[in-house]
Amino acid sequence: MSSIDQDSESGRKADRYFGGIVALLALAFVVFAVPSISDEWLTATGSQYYTVGPGLMPTIAGLATMAFALISVLTPGQTNHLAGLAEPGAKRQVFLLIVLGFAYIAGLSLVGFLLATPVMLFIFLYGFGIRNWIVLPCVAVLAPLAIHLFFFYIFNLELPVGDYGISLR
């Protein structure tokens, strides 16, 4: 067996192991952590107007994580996607994107979701190598708008508006 075949096989094993561990953690989260969320909201004033409780989004997130992890187990990748971290400057780029994530969270209270998210998403996409100048601004603007509308009309929730932010209300 050549070294390329061995690298490919070890990458598939790593995908399966990692996917399996993440799937088990997601299952544990849905089974043990989500039920521990308090049901006090049921007795709050106006609770009769709410159709979903605080456990819905964590349940959806846990089940989606488990589904993607199982996909990783069942269809492991053919190449090592983390090999790019060995390139010069890659670790610095990842560090800067992590710092951007923290800056985004801090900026939400100041400028709000609809202003902070397109900027953050544009920088993230560019940082991860998307250079299509049609896709980049379209995704950066339309995805946050769609998320905002989804939360506003489906869940009847207002995402952070911020001190200088805007809202579609």
Image: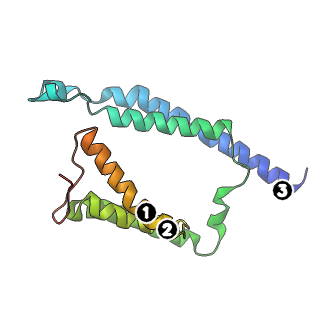
Q: Nearer the viewer, mark 3 or mark 1?
A: 1
Asked whether the residues under the numbered discs 2 and 3 touch, taking CB atoms below 8 Å apart as contact, a structural biologist would say no
The kind of secondary structure element at disc 2 is loop
* Image x and y of residue 40, in percent: 18, 27
Q: Amino acid at mark 1?
A: Cys
Mark 2 — residue? 134
- Residue at image coords 46%, 30%: 28
Answer above or below: position of 17 versus 102.
Answer: above
Q: Earlier in the sequence, mark 3 or mark 1?
A: 3
Answer above or below: position of 104 versus 10.
Answer: below
**Badge 3: residue crowd in 10 Å (few <14, some 14–19, many ≥20):** few
> Who is closer to the viewer here, 99 or 134?
134
Name the disc covering residue 19, or none.
none
Q: Which colour style is shown?
A: rainbow
- Residue 140 is left or right of residue 67, and the answer is left
Answer above or below: position of 155 versus 126.
Answer: above
Spatial CA distance of label 2 from label 3 is: 36 Å
- Residue 164 is left or right of residue 147, and the answer is left
Mark 3 — residue? 4
Mark 1 — residue? 138
Can you see residue 80? Answer: yes
The kind of secondary structure element at disc 1 is helix
Asked whether the residues under the numbered discs 1 and 2 touch, taking CB atoms below 8 Å apart as contact, a structural biologist would say yes
* Image x and y of residue 41, in percent: 18, 29
Spatial CA distance of label 1 from label 2 is: 6 Å
> Who is closer to the viewer here, 12 or 121?
121
**Badge 2: residue crowd in 10 Å (few <14, some 14–19, many ≥20):** few
- Residue at image coords 34%, 37%: 57
